[in-house]
Every structure is written in structure tokens, then in C-alpha cells.
């Protein structure tokens, strides 16, 4: 970096090939391949112990893999790890900020370590505090910051050197909804400015909101990949629910639909509801209502629910609601 603080980098992606990581007899990663296109967000998803954080630590050169290759922005991790680190911004699961220093001092210190002059470092710190909406607290010690403010400061620290590639390991874990939405906006701004983002998250809604593509791993192996829309189309279905006027007619309604070859979507706790799974909600809704009308069964409402990444995750891993680190 130039000593006047000018940003050093262009855009770049991440390419991982045949990545294997063993800890003794435990094989944490098994021939993992990843491709994160420049200027996009890739979400890395999987249940607890799937290997996501291990993969992130290898890509960021904090671990040396048993075998395989990692290339970031055209730089090979094995042959030039020091240069690769200069191209990365990393925000881990826990905010790595000094509670004794102020917000300005934290970011100024990082900027100085990145090669900025003293004046440029302070200017960069102030700009980032403004960008992440914590400028008013910049002169206060971080020990008095809320969890959300610390996470924003940590993410700001990862961006001091304008890295072309940013790795975010569960960046919104433990944040309240308002802080989470604020960080989502910051990630979108990063991508709009040309950065490439690799994101692990325990919030599948987060991946749905932010990711251009997603890779699902389980037990160290890639089990699915694609855009969120593709994954939902391939591994989950929409549902259509009809609400009956008379709950006493539900058994007969189910039989009417079964006689027409319509498969019910699991048991319903609400005695007025009958639900079916479908890839084409519009025609199926009309079919359900029509069949029940012919049988003299009154329908007072219909509801359509589109699939989410949560549905995909449960289908692929059987992990219930856990989608974390």
C-alpha cells in the first residue's frame, strides 16, 4: 500500500480445489471445491461440525490444509501466503477489537499496520466509523460499546485496507434484528463497490437475502451448490393450504383429495386446514378449491407458502433448525 493511504487492490475471486483437512484420524474436509466469482457473495452453509469454519481458516491462511489448493484474487495460498493476506479482510465469529482503545484508535492502529501514514490512517478510521454509523461513539472506549457496535467496528477493521476479498464468519451472530439489518446493508455496499464476499452464517434468511450463490456442506463434503433460487427449486417445494369453513369436514376433505391422487403435506395441527406440497401453486390452488366445491365442502381461505433455504437445509442435512458454524 502506498503510504498516503491509497487503496491498493482490484477485484478478485476465490478458487478452492480438492481441499482436504485431517486432524489426526478425523477428516474435517473431504475434497472440497469452491468457486466465488469476483464481485459476488457466496454463502457457505452447513450444520454444526460440517467444516465451514475450518474451510474459512484455511482460505484465510490461518490453517495449512492436508492437501488441496486455495487461490484468492489470483494468489496461491501455499506459495505466497503473505501476499494473499494483504488481499483479504477477515471478520471472525467474535469481534476482534481492543476494549481499552476507542473506536478511532482501534481502526487507526489497523490502518497503520496496513501501511497508512499517521494522517491517512486517522482519516481512514473516521471515514469507516461514519460508514458504519458509529461515528458518534468513535471517541469512546470500546468496552462501553454494545454487541452490535462491536461487530460493526470489527467489520470496519476488516475493510481498512480496501481488500478485494472479504471473509465473514457468522458476522451477525448474536445481534439484534436492527443491527443485523445494518450489517446486511454494509455487506451489500461492499459488493456494490466491487468486493467479493465469502459468508458463513447460522441465519438462512441472511443467505437468502445476501448470497448470489450458496454451497452446502455436511460432514466435510459438499452436498449441494447453486443460487438460492436454484436450491429452493431443486430441493424444496411450495405448499398450498385450504382453510375449511367446518373443521368437522376435514377428514372427508382429505379423502376427496386423496381420491383425486393429491398427496397431503404431513399432519396439520389446525383442524380447519388441509395442506399439499406442489411446484406449481397457482393451478393446484384452483384444483383444490374446485374439487372441494364439487364435494360440497366450503373453503373460506387459501394460503400459499414458498420454499425457503430453511426447507432446503432440513431436506439436505436433516439438521432441523440448526444451520450454524
Image: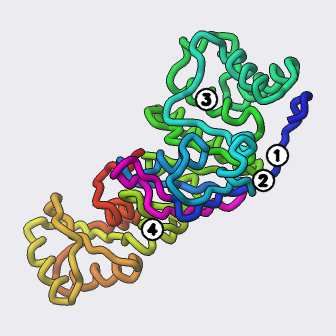
Tell me the CA gap for discs 3 and 2: 22 Å
Q: Which image quarter is the C terminus in? A: top left
Disc on the earlier residue, 4 or 3: 3
Tell me the CA gap for discs 3 and 1: 20 Å
Residue 274 is left or right of residue 164, and the answer is: left
Where disc 4 sits, the SS reads: strand
Tell me the CA gap for discs 4 and 3: 31 Å
* Magenta region includes residue 132: no
Where disc 2 sits, the SS reads: loop
Where disc 1 sits, the SS reads: loop
Q: How many marks?
A: 4
**Residue behind mark 4:** 224
**Residue behind mark 1:** 9
Where in the figure is residue 210, as x and y percent of width and height?
A: 58, 52
Q: Is residue 158 above or below residue 59?
A: above
Whether pointer 2 and pointer 1 mark residues with C-beta atoms closer than 8 Å, the reply is: yes
* Magenta region includes residue 36: yes
Highlighted magenta segment, given as a residue range: 20-38
**Residue behind mark 2:** 11
Q: Residue at x 26, y 70 (%)?
A: 242
Amino acid at each position: 500500500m502506498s503510504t498516503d493511504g491509497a487503496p491498493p487492490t482490484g477485484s478478485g475471486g476465490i478458487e478452492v480445489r480438492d481441499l482436504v483437512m485431517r486432524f489426526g484420524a478425523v477428516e474435517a474436509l473431504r475434497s472440497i471445491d469452491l468457486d466465488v466469482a469476483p464481485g459476488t457473495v457466496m454463502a457457505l452453509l452447513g450444520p454444526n461440525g460440517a467444516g465451514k469454519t475450518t474451510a474459512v481458516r484455511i482460505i484465510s491462511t490461518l490453517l495449512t490444509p492436508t492437501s488441496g489448493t486455495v487461490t484468492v484474487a489470483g494468489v496461491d495460498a501455499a506459495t505466497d501466503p503473505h501476499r494473499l493476506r494483504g488481499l483479504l479482510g477477515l471478520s471472525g465469529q467474535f469481534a476482534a477489537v481492543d476494549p481499552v482503545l476507542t473506536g478511532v484508535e482501534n481502526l487507526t492502529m489497523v490502518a497503520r499496520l496496513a501501511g497508512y501514514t499517521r494522517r491517512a490512517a486517522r482519516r481512514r478510521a473516521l471515514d469507516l466509523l461514519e460508514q458504519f454509523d458509529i461515528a458518534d461513539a468513535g471517541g469512546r472506549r470500546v468496552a462501553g460499546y454494545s454487541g452490535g457496535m462491536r461487530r460493526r467496528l470489527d467489520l470496519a477493521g476488516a475493510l481498512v485496507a480496501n481488500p478485494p476479498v472479504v471473509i465473514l464468519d457468522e458476522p451477525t451472530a448474536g445481534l439484534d434484528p436492527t443491527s443485523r439489518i445494518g450489517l446486511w446493508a454494509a455487506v451489500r455496499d461492499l459488493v456494490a463497490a466491487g468486493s467479493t464476499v465469502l459468508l458463513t452464517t447460522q441465519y438462512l434468511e441472511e443467505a437468502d437475502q445476501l448470497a448470489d450463490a450458496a454451497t452446502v456442506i455436511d460432514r466435510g463434503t459438499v452436498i449441494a451448490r447453486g443460487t438460492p433460487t436454484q436450491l429452493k427449486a431443486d430441493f424444496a417445494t411450495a405448499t398450498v393450504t385450504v382453510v375449511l369453513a367446518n373443521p368437522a369436514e376435514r377428514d372427508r376433505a382429505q379423502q376427496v383429495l386423496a381420491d383425486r391422487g393429491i398427496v397431503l403435506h404431513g399432519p396439520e395441527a389446525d383442524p380447519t386446514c388441509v395442506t399439499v406440497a406442489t411446484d406449481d401453486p397457482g393451478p393446484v390452488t384452483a384444483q383444490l378449491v374446485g374439487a372441494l366445491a364439487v364435494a360440497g365442502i366450503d373453503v373460506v381461505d387459501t394460503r400459499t407458502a414458498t420454499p425457503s433455504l430453511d426447507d432446503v437445509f432440513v431436506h439436505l442435512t436433516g439438521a432441523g433448525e440448526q444451520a450454524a458454524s
